[in-house]
Amino acid sequence: MGIFIKNPETERVVRELAAARGDTITGVIDKLAREALEREQAAAASSERTLRNLAQMRASNERFRRISGLDKQPARPVTKAEWDALWPTGIPEIDDA
C-alpha cells in the first residue's frame, strides 16, 4: 500500500530529509511517525499519571478532613489575626539567589 503526498513542498522536505539521513522516503516517514506516536503515548501516560496523582491527593484530603472532623464543621474564612498568628515573627523572606 502506498502513500500519496499531494503537497509538493512536503514531498520535497521528506526527500531532502531522506537524502540527508541516507535513508529511503519510506524509512524516514516510518521513523518520524513512530517517534511522533511514542511522544503521543508518553504524553497520554503522563496525563494519566497526573490524574491518578490528583485523585490520590483528593482522597487523602478527604480522609484527613474526615479524621480531623473538618468535614463536619462549617467552613469559615480565616481572619487576618489567625493568619498572622501562623508567623509570629512575620512571614519568612524567600531568597531568590
Image (cartoon, rainbow, N blue to C red):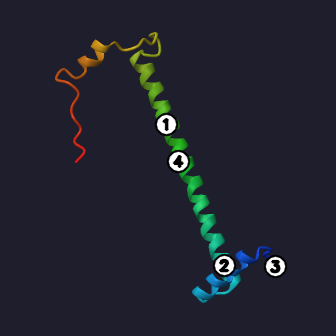
Q: Nearer the viewer, mark 2 or mark 1?
A: 2
What type is the residue that disc 3 sits on?
Gly
Give the vertical position of 20 relative to 65 (above or below): below
Cα gap from disc 1 to disc 4, whole angstroms: 10 Å
| Residue drawn where x is 62% and y is 88% of the image | 19
Q: Is residue 49 left or right of residue 96?
A: right
Q: Earlier in the sequence, mark 1 or mark 3?
A: 3
Residue under label 3, please give it.
Answer: 2
**Between 46 and 32, which is closer to the camera in this rendering?**
32
| Residue drawn where x is 45% and y is 28% of the image | 61
**Between 41 and 16, which is closer to the camera in this rendering?**
16
- Image coordinates of residue 43 in percent, x first then y, are 57, 55
Q: Is residue 12 left or right of residue 58?
A: right
| Residue drawn where x is 47% and y is 16% of the image | 71
Residue under label 1, please give it.
Answer: 56
What type is the residue that disc 4 sits on?
Arg
Cα gap from disc 2 to disc 4, whole angstroms: 36 Å
Task: Looking at this view, name the residue that lies furthest to the front.
Answer: 9
Task: Looking at this view, name the residue that lies furthest to the left.
Answer: 89
Q: Of helix, strand and loop, which one carries label 4?
A: helix
- Quarter placement of the N terminus: bottom right
Q: Of helix, strand and loop, which one carries label 1?
A: helix
Q: Nearer the viewer, mark 2 or mark 4?
A: 2
Cα gap from disc 3 to disc 2, whole angstroms: 18 Å
| Residue drawn where x is 27% and y is 12% of the image | 81
| Pointers 4 and 3 in contact (C-beta within 8 Å) | no
